[in-house]
Amino acid sequence: QIISQLPYFAGSTKPELPGDGVARYFTMAFCPFSQRVHLLLAAKEIPHHKIYVDLIDKPEWYKEYSPLGKVPAVQFPGLKDQPTLVESLIIAEYLDEQYPEPRRLFPTDPLQKAQDKILIERFAPVVSAVYPVLTCNPNAPADALEKFEAALEVFEVELGQRGTPYFAGQTIGLVDYMIWPWFERFPSMKLNSQYELDPKRFEKLLKWRDLVAQDAAVQKTALDVQLHAEFQKSKTLGKPQYDVAFKTIA
């Protein structure tokens, strides 16, 4: 259930949330870290209430759930003391362990699990390098795309070495879900800055992207590339348009 399609902002009244014990998912529609958690909620078919938060003009009461004011955050009112978890990978790992059905998404083998977590951490240079371009920052470093491609090549090579359709193996797994949100957003750069991934240099990753795009949880949480592009453009004007997420694409 979506509590409100409009994000809560500074000065807004704290919402009256249902007292039904269902998880409460605090998010921002365009946040890739939040989408990580959304993917897990969808893949595990976990009932939840969705509350949107304005990250530029945050409501004061939100710190009760997320002390640093970040998204995602998930509260579990059905548990003792109604705990709230923050940080996308921590939440995702908890959900995978707490809700093992329909299947576990992290490897059960400790070594493989550790290697997958390392790979997820190695995606950080990809994110930091591409962020200024992805967000249409006019002051993006001249070598931003070069650094982005160099960082992304690690994943092209890794996928080839693993020799499987997904990073997780023959079926999609947590490592795939944790890096997917950025691949959903990369095509928006073609609309805003005429950039797209080299199909020869990133042949395996692009095949992986097409495959992951067919996943049910990915489709359930996806936003159209036009919406991503429009939102990023709005940020350059100094006023992010969060409600763009609810527009209908003709």
Image (cartoon, helix red, strand yellow):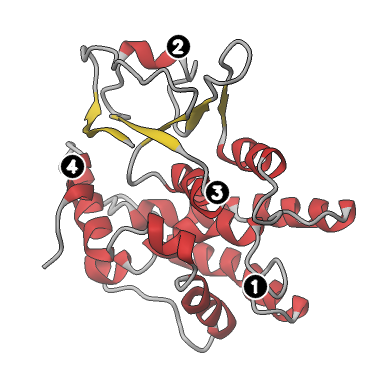
Q: Which secondary structure, mark 4?
A: helix
User: In the rendered view of the protein, which quadrant contains the N terminus?
Assistant: top left
Q: CA distance from mark 3 to mark 4?
A: 23 Å
Q: CA distance from mark 1 to mark 4?
A: 33 Å
User: Which comes before the other along the chain, label 1 or label 4?
Assistant: 1
Q: Which secondary structure, mark 2?
A: helix
Q: Against 248, is 9 above or below?
A: above
User: In the rendered view of the protein, which quadrant contains the C terminus?
Assistant: bottom left
Q: CA distance from mark 2 to mark 4?
A: 24 Å
Label pair 3/1, CB-CB below 8 angstroms: no
Q: Which residue is mark 4?
A: 243
User: Which comes before the other along the chain, label 2 or label 1?
Assistant: 2
Label pair 2/1, CB-CB below 8 angstroms: no
Which residue is nearer to you in this view: 186 or 146?
186
Comparing labels 3 and 1, the label whose residue is closer to the camera: 3
Comparing labels 3 and 4, the label whose residue is closer to the camera: 3
The extreme front residue here reads: 20
Mark 4: which amino acid?
Asp
Mark 3: which amino acid?
Leu
Q: Against 22, is 32 above or below?
A: below
10 Å neighbourhood of mark 2: few (<14), some, or many (≥20)?
Answer: few
Q: Which secondary structure, mark 3?
A: helix
Q: Which residue is mark 3?
A: 40
Q: Which residue is mark 2?
A: 64
- For the question of whether residue 143 can be seen, the reply is no
Q: Is residue 88 left or right of residue 116?
A: left
Q: Which residue is mark 1?
A: 166
User: Which comes before the other along the chain, label 3 or label 4?
Assistant: 3
Q: Against 198, is 74 above or below?
A: above
Which residue is nearer to you in this view: 115 or 190?
115
Q: Who's the residue at 30% across and 49% down the image?
A: 139
